[in-house]
Image (cartoon, coloured by chain):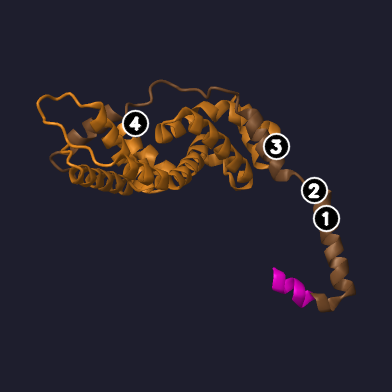
Amino acid sequence: MNEPNEDGLKKLLRRVLPRVEGEPEPGRDLWPAILKRLDAQSAPAPWFDWALLAALVALVACFPASIPVFLYYL
Amino acid sequence: MENGRSDALDEFRQGSVDAFEMLFRLHQRAVYGWILCIVRNPATAEELTVESFWRIYRAHARFQPEMGFEGWARRIATHAALDWLRTTRRETELRSEACGELAAPAKADSAMSAEIGAKIALAFERLPPKLRIAAVLAVVEEQPQKDVAAALGISVAAVKLRVFRALRLLRKDLESRGITP
């Protein structure tokens, strides 16, 4: 699977894209950012969303005829 | 020490954030370094390290301690980097179009001009992400092919094939732009 000029192209690539040397370290502590992501994942939905959902359910329960209207606008 | 690490792996599997932090502190450099090899930009590598560890935590229930944490983390990180390469590929294509064509210099000496170097780097970025990731790890970073295969979740033969296809595409692309490697 080797072409005759493949080594030349590999050398050229290594010149253009030098290897990452040593053991690089992140420039900052990444743990706080990870915790933030984890918190965002587990954060509960805001109370307003729940209130809106409850209002919608109540409306649909009281006026079932409004269901097609909601479906139309979805 | 080994017992402590093994306990941490078990606790992590059960979702302990403390155990996860311990594993993060132990492996973050390796994961960051691996991602940096692929994306070649420290700021992007930091972002992807965060993304990778977030994915790692989300998948904690699927972790099998007997398989080892580092290889598993590296595999998740490789996929996070691959997703990033896919999203940025279109930007590279647009950048390439904006750069236009450059005339190839006469081959009077072996010194490579900065312009040609930039063209080659850009052509490399244009490769399909799956081929590019195999080529950058196996050719540029000279990582053992079995490690590349494990990180990509493919066989060593498939890595060789991807590298071969990457080099062939790169050569074609460069030749179409008047650069003979």
Q: Which mark is residue B141?
A: 4
Q: Callout 4: 10 Å neighbours few (<14), some, many (20+)?
A: some
Q: Assess whether residue B141 is covered by the magenta stretch.
A: no
- Within the image, what quadrant is residue B147 found in? top left
The N terminus of chain B: image quadrant? top right
Q: Colour of chain A?
A: brown
Q: Which residue is mark 2?
A: A46
Amino acid at circle 1: Trp
Where residue A39 appears, x then y in whole percent? 71, 39
Amino acid at circle 2: Pro
Query: Given contact means CB atoms under 8 Å apart, are the residues at marks 4 and 3 in contact?
Result: no
| A3 horizontally vs B145: left or right | left
Q: Nearer the viewer, mark 1 or mark 3?
A: 1
| B129 horizontally vs B157: left or right | right
Mark 1 → mark 2, Cα distance in angstroms: 7 Å
- Taking the image as drawn, is residue B20 in sight? no
Instruction: Say which chain is orange.
Output: B
Q: Which residue is mark 1?
A: A50
The C terminus of chain B: image quadrant? top left
Q: Residue at x 41, y 44 (%)?
A: B91
Q: Nearer the viewer, mark 3 or mark 2?
A: 2
Mark 4 → mark 1, Cα distance in angstroms: 51 Å
Of B50 and B19, the residue lying toward us = B50
Amino acid at circle 4: Glu
Q: Callout 1: 10 Å neighbours few (<14), some, many (20+)?
A: few
Secondary structure predominantly adopted by residues drawn in magenta: helix
Q: Which residues fall within the magenta stretch?
A: A67-74
Query: Given contact means CB atoms under 8 Å apart, are the residues at marks 1 and 2 in contact?
Result: yes
Q: Residue at x 68, y 35 (%)?
A: A36
Element at label 4? loop
